[in-house]
Amino acid sequence: ADDIGFAIDAFFELNAGDERFRGMIDLDGVGVLGHSFGGAASGQAALDDGRIAAGINIDGLQIGDMVDENIETPFMFMHHDNRQALNRTPNVNLFRRAEGPAYLLVIEGSGHYDFSDFSLPLLSEGLPLPPGALGTIDGRRCVEIVNGLVVAFFDVYVRGEDPAALDRVFERYPEIDITRK
């Protein structure tokens, strides 16, 4: 989370001082996202840093202050399809306590590694992965779904576009099991 704040600080410095970038970076709304531990870091950063307009935790068990504090920043918790788990959505309590717009998603047929490049055929077929790391969903399809979700979520909550854009993504992909708040 501190690294995210550091990167945001660097963008503000570039935007204010460096001749090549001065005034070129739109910092009115910053979105953060991460996968796994990076997702947890994104959640912590969104809780800590008022410059962050929206955040996404992609399949990370949220740790840090959000365990005790409610998030007000629009936030999306995205999970893989862990059908064997007693709780398929381990961040559900944080979602329920969210004070701003919040989304709790499961991408049906996905595994934890499907949210990374390992889901793509060239890597998934050529590298030894732990059993169960990938789900049954086609890797390219999962990447398409995640990209659609990320772009639409940030378009709505960072760029201020029509929330119907996000609804269209939910409708386009029946693999998304969604709970909204």
Image: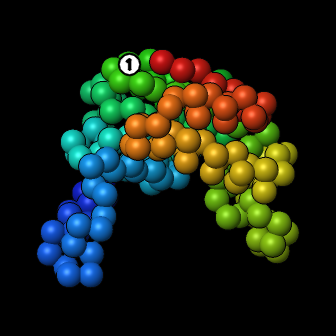
Q: In the drawing, does residue 88 fall left or right of residue 127?
A: left
Numbered disc 1: secondary structure: helix
User: Residue pushed farthest left?
Assistant: 17
Left or right? Give the position of 38 relative to 84.
left
- Residue 25, position as x, y percentages in the image: 30, 64
Percent across and percent down for residue 27 are 27, 55
Residue at the disc numbered 1: 97
Q: How many marks?
A: 1
Question: What amino acid type is highlighted by mark number 1?
Answer: Arg
Judge by depth and name the residue closer to the eye, 17 or 134. 17
Up-down relation of residue 13 to residue 27 (above or below): below
Residue 159: x and y in percent read 41, 43
Q: Can residue 57 be seen in this view?
A: no
- Taking the image as shown, residue 48 lies to the left or right of residue 93, namely left
| 90 with respect to 24 (left or right) | right
Q: Which residue is drawn at 64% across and 59% down?
A: 116
Query: Along the line of sight, which residue is nearer the eye, 4 or 15?
Result: 15
**Residue 54 in which image quadrant:** top left
By what rule are the colours in the image chosen?
Answer: rainbow
Could one spot residue 127 in this view of the protein?
A: yes
* Residue appearing at x 27%, y 49% in the figure: 28
Badge 1 crowding class, 10 Å Cα cut-off, few under 14, some 14 to 19, many 20 or more, is some
